[in-house]
Amino acid sequence: MPLAIGTTLSRRRFLTLTGVLAAGSLALSASTLWPRWARAEPELATRLLRLGRDIYPHEAIADRYYLAPLTPLLGEQRELIAAGLDDLDRRARAAHGRDYAAVDSAAEREALLRQIEDGEFFQAVRNTLVVGLYDTPELWQAHFGYEGSSWEQGGYVGRGYNDLVIDWL
Amino acid sequence: MSTRFEHDDDGVLVIIGSGAGGGTLAHALARKGIKSVVLEAGKRYALEDIENDEWAMFEKISWLDERITAGPRQLSETFPNLPAWIVKGVGGSTIHWAGVALRFQPHEFRLHSEVGDIAGANLLDWPISYEELEPYYVQAERHMGVTGDASGMPLHDWNNNFMVLAEGARRVGYEKLRAGPMAINTRPYDDRPQCMQAGFCMQGCRFGAKWSTMYTDIPRAEATGYCEVRPNAMALTIEHDERGRVNAVVYADAEGNLQRQRARAVCVAGNSIESPRLLLNSHSALFPDGLANSSGQVGRNYMTHATACVFAEMPKPVNMHRGTTFAGIISDEARLDRSRGFVGGYTLEVMSLGLPFFAKFMDPANGGWGRDYAAILEKYDHLSGVWICGEDLPMEENGITLHDSRKDQYGLPVPIVYKGDHPNDEALRRHGQQQARSCYEAVGAVRVFDVPDFPTSHNVGTNRMSARPEDGVVNQWGQAHDIDNLFVSDGSQFTSSGAENPTLTIVALALRQADHIAERMSRGEL
Ligand SMILES: Cc1cc2nc3c(=O)[nH]c(=O)nc-3n(C[C@H](O)[C@H](O)[C@H](O)COP(=O)(O)OP(=O)(O)OC[C@H]3O[C@@H](n4cnc5c(N)ncnc54)[C@H](O)[C@@H]3O)c2cc1C
Ligand code: SF4
């Protein structure tokens, strides 16, 4: 069924696909929490990660939260992704003499991406990420101050829906 | 389970759609002992199916059958297959709606007389007046539980989001600031609980505090024994006899099998894209341009409200996601005042989106990413938002047509939903954006930014009411000018859009239509 908005995968489905839900011990190093495909192909994962982190840069958010929502793309549009990353590296080498991920300046990387932002590759990554990354409940409270589902706690009656004091004027 | 009617029972009315229009009508008729079969394309959901989860609910209940967004508007690029946000399910878009329940103003029923002809617009007065509809507004408000005089329920307390906007509004001189009226209980009413300020009104109210035909009109209609609701039943065509009176509806059932339900009369309430589409698809030798279309107006004059969204980042957290989604209304600009450079007015309605939706909708165009974008999202809890709901002038070329080769899963031509703006809409929108910006600046916003249109939630006008048969599709009762036992019972009847959200008016019209149908039946005319 055609769906205009981003990915058709539900959050729950891609969380189980990627094993994020099952990820356990905090003692594990960051990359052992990566989705399975990313651990199998760390080079591809690292390139895609740089791109994802440049599209929606949130310094404090761990890599795996970028990789997890991109997982379905690897299944469904692998060739598009591989070709797109190669093209991006070619552009980076032409402009800066090195691969995209090795370009140090965030502003220079952003400028490269603005050149391709209307293309299919970039939009596939962006559309997947904008739905997936921000639909990750573990990140909401700490990084954005969004509290998510509230009916289980009886909504916000008595929990701060009308407690604002405008003291900044 | 409820009563079942035979497929060849020609004593039943067939109602297509179970949302604001269809659900209300079925219930009102059932209470009068009038039999109906409601065909609803979507599934039936229970309160337990309602989640506080934006994407999960969007995926679960939206109408996602193929549609084409057309016209010179950004939506054609950003949402090429999703022109409108409409629910496919028992209860229709009243599952998703946010509960804002405003009456039209008296002059809005006669905008054409007030302002005269406007080049490029297809303006027309409604064939009914505010005074005629007023008793039904009162009835609708009691029926739905709208806060205020009719129901006796107090308005809601102001939530944080509205406090911010209202403070700014006061400072720019606005006076008509209210937390409602809303069809959301502030205390137990009509066997439904009070609102818990959970903040997911647009995903469906898990508590049932917000009026929706899903858990009021539909089960109550069924309980009378006079109404059978068939979910997963997509009406494909309406049939007629040799005299041109409608007599049956052909639909696809849950298994995809074609069924034919005989009908004494048919009431179309599929919302403003599907209703005209069904009439157009029902063309026949007698009605080659589609049913009820001798005027050529079926599918035309599509109006969506002239809307825009403005968000602001405040110096401290607002937590807009707490409390009702559309928590307060500013009505100062709803008046008719041509000195502003446009006709018609608009309301300013405070709104919130959760982080998942806001991240997508803040800028759905290709350029919606990058450092600045992410920086605003990191301030999510500091945001406050407002939605502009303004008069959208009818234009003949805006509307629903059928694609000449693409077919949907039922084998029906895919609808093309074309919409462009009249210069009046643009002027109104700019004014609204500027005023919203001023409000937020007056309350100390760090930054204020426009958020583009998302898929349309208010869809009206495509089978409009008119006094004369050549100007529109239905008369003042919603009865087709051409066919005396065919009715339109949803927002597609609207002759103009007003500056108010449509649902209260849809419900008032449906209640009025039920009285009319009952009266004609008692006279032996139907
Ligand atoms: C997110 C959101 C927020 C909103 N907030 C507000 C608000 O605050 N205030 C307000 O006034 N309005 C609001 N609205 C708009 C309101 O929901 C609609 O105006 C109203 O529900 C329209 O009523 P209707 O009867 O025309 O159609 P709907 O309520 O959409 O019902 C149409 C039904 O018909 C069914 N159907 C369509 N075609 C067929 C067919 N061929 N066969 C069988 N069934 C069919 C559909 O599946 C659907 O269930 C909102 C809408 C949305 C989406
Ligand atoms: S805020 Fe109130 S009406 Fe809205 S969903 Fe929550 S409980 Fe229901």
Image (cartoon, coloured by chain):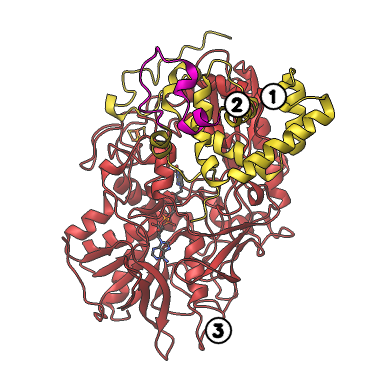
The structure residue drawn at horizontal position 43% and vertical position 50%, both measured from the top left corner, is B62
Label 2 sits on what residue type?
Answer: Thr
Chain under numbered label 2:
A
Label 1: how many Cα within 10 Å (few below 14, some 14–19, many 20+):
some
- Measure how far apart labels 1 and 3 are at the Cα level: 62 Å
Q: Chain of mark 1?
A: A
The colour with which the image depicts chain B is red
The answer to whether residue B504 shows anywhere in this view is yes
Q: Main secondary structure of the magenta part?
A: loop
Residue A73, image quadrant = top right
Residue at mark 3 shares a chain with residue at mark 2? no
Q: Is residue B134 above or below residue A112?
A: below
Name the kind of residue labelled 3 in the image.
Answer: Pro
- Evaluate if marks 1 and 3 touch, with contact meaning CB atoms under 8 Å apart: no
Callout in the foreground (1, 3): 1
Horizontal side, residue B398 vs residue B179: left or right = right
**CB-based contact (under 8 Å), mark 2 and mark 1:** yes
Chain given the colour yellow:
A
The mark found on residue A46 in the picture is 2
Element at badge 1?
Answer: helix
Looking at the rendered image, the quarter that the N terminus of chain B falls into is bottom left
Residue labelled with disc 1 = A101
The magenta stretch spans which residues? A19-41
SS for dot 3: loop
Q: Position of residue B27 (x, y in %)?
A: 27, 59
Residue that numbered label 3 is attached to: B288
